[in-house]
Amino acid sequence: MTAFAQDGIAREFIDALNQATEATMAPSTVQTDSAGKAYQMVALASALAVQDAVDSMRNVGTLADAASAAALSQLAATGEARYLEVLKAADEMRAQSVNIFSARAQAAAELLQKFPTR
């Protein structure tokens, strides 16, 4: 038969609870767990920043496509060379958006790499 504490709870059960509390609430455990959570939050923020950069690049591409389509339509209708400049500007927009995306993605990756994991 199991020995019971004064309040009727088995001593072994109380001992198990105490051991679990000590194991999970020890300062080193709490600190490690907190550092892991902080790293996960920074990783999530970095991923969201990259996702936003992709969305931005996609939006610029959509605008550049619309501008190119309008310029090609006008070029075909009028033959005016000024619409070639619009096509050139649209291509530059696309190239700049790729450069901006690359810079943002690199910054997010560097931030995550430099963030302490402990």
Image (cartoon, rainbow, N blue to C red):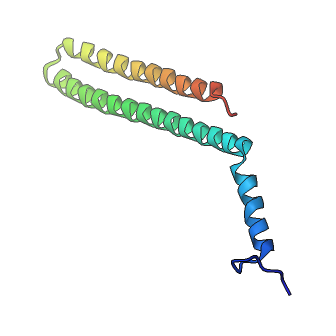
For the point 52% across and 40% down, the residue is 44
Relative image position of residue 85 (x, y in whole percent): 26, 13
Of 14 and 54, nearer the camera is: 14
Name the side, left or right, on which 46 lies relative to 57. Answer: right
Name the side, left or right, on which 19 lies relative to 32. Answer: right
Relative image position of residue 68 (x, y in whole percent): 27, 26
Occupied quadrant, residue 76: top left
When the figure is inspected, residue 73 is found, relative to residue 35, above or below; the finding is: above
Q: Quadrant of the N terminus?
A: bottom right
Q: Quadrant of the C terminus?
A: top right
Of 98 and 50, nearer the camera is: 50
Relative image position of residue 6 (x, y in whole percent): 73, 77
For the point 33% across and 33% down, the residue is 59
Of 6 and 70, nearer the camera is: 6
The outermost residue toward the front is 6
The outermost residue toward the bottom is 1
Tell how many labels: 0
Of 24 and 111, nearer the camera is: 24
